[in-house]
Amino acid sequence: MTTIDSLLDRIQVLVDQADKTFFPPAAPPAWDYIAYRWRRKEGLRGVRRPHQVWLEDLLCLDHQKAEIVRNTRQFVNGRSANNVLLWGARGTGKSTLIKAVLNEFADQGLRLIEVDKEELIELPELLDLLWEREEHFILFCDDLSFEADEPGYKALKAVLDGSISAPPENVLIYASSNRRHLLPEFHSENREARIVDGELHQGEATEEKISLSERFGLWLAFHPFTQDQYLEIVDYWLRALGADAEHPKLTQTAALQWALKRGSRSGRAAYQFARDWAGRS
């Protein structure tokens, strides 16, 4: 062994000792929660008050609800199911739908673990904790997007499909993103595409970006709401919050003005308007 190799080995020993000193092993998780957060330094920590939202609270998303409920039901019943990518316009209910699915199936053994993008590199360690559990776990990656050189990008690819280790049968990944392929796309990349024997072949940069999103077996698209859909959602939340409904035209006008100021007729904007209007009432 060379002097350099010996020095590197000693440095690694020191680094390992420092990790044990400053980052002691996390306490064993408490398994009596339905929702958790994964943090490298803290391990798996239960969420005391999960967001109480239900499938019936999500309007104008019948197809998306039906597909994710079907997939999740297969999963909790021990049948084959797919990882899910929910992508599309902001504020249209992607993350809320995942939370609602948890509440729908929690009494059947479904559990939700929120994993931030920065923590994805530690996914193998998390999966080791879940292998022998009887519950079924959804790893929830919210508002996911990457730059191509981020370490979490490759870690997620490996866990989805591409590692020498088989993924646990009791774990799926549900991710939400505003980007269909989770990575920024540039106009210049379109020039790399070419036609070979009548077939379109994407350039290497595009193929690399598609290679992550295609590892999700189920894609659910979320599009901006129409004006009528937006007003329907506003009306639902006004009634749910007990707001005054004596002047519906006045309320609709105010709701449309709210959306115009926000630059979005999203479900999020509709809910925020309803809270504001109900509070004023």
Image (cartoon, rainbow, N blue to C red):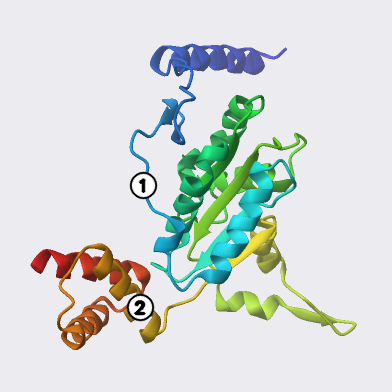
CA separation in Å, label 1 and label 2: 23 Å
Q: Residue at x 40, y 80 (%)?
A: 229
The residue pinned by badge 2 equals: 232
The residue type indicated by label 1 comes to His
| Residue 56, quarter of picture | bottom left
Q: Quadrant of the N terminus?
A: top right
Disc 1 residue crowd, few under 14, some 14–19, many 20+, Cα 10 Å = few
Q: Is residue 185 visible?
A: no
Q: Residue at x 42, y 28 (%)?
A: 45
In-front residue for pair 50/57: 57
Query: Is residue 193 toward the left or the right of residue 59 in the image?
Result: right
> Which element type, helix, strand or loop, lies under badge 2?
helix
Disc 2 residue crowd, few under 14, some 14–19, many 20+, Cα 10 Å = some
Q: Is residue 99 visible?
A: yes
Residue 80 percent coordinates (x, y): 75, 47
> Which element type, helix, strand or loop, lies under badge 1?
loop
Residue 106 percent coordinates (x, y): 51, 40
Q: Which mark is residue 242?
A: none
In-front residue for pair 154/28: 28
Residue 43 percent coordinates (x, y): 46, 26
> Of circles 1 and 2, which is in front?
2
Q: Which mark is residue 51?
A: 1
Query: Is residue 6 toward the left or the right of residue 57 in the image?
Result: right
The residue type indicated by label 2 comes to Glu
The mark that comes first in sequence, 1 or 2, is 1
From the viewer's perspective, is residue 69 above or below residue 119? below
From the viewer's perspective, is residue 64 above or below residue 246? above
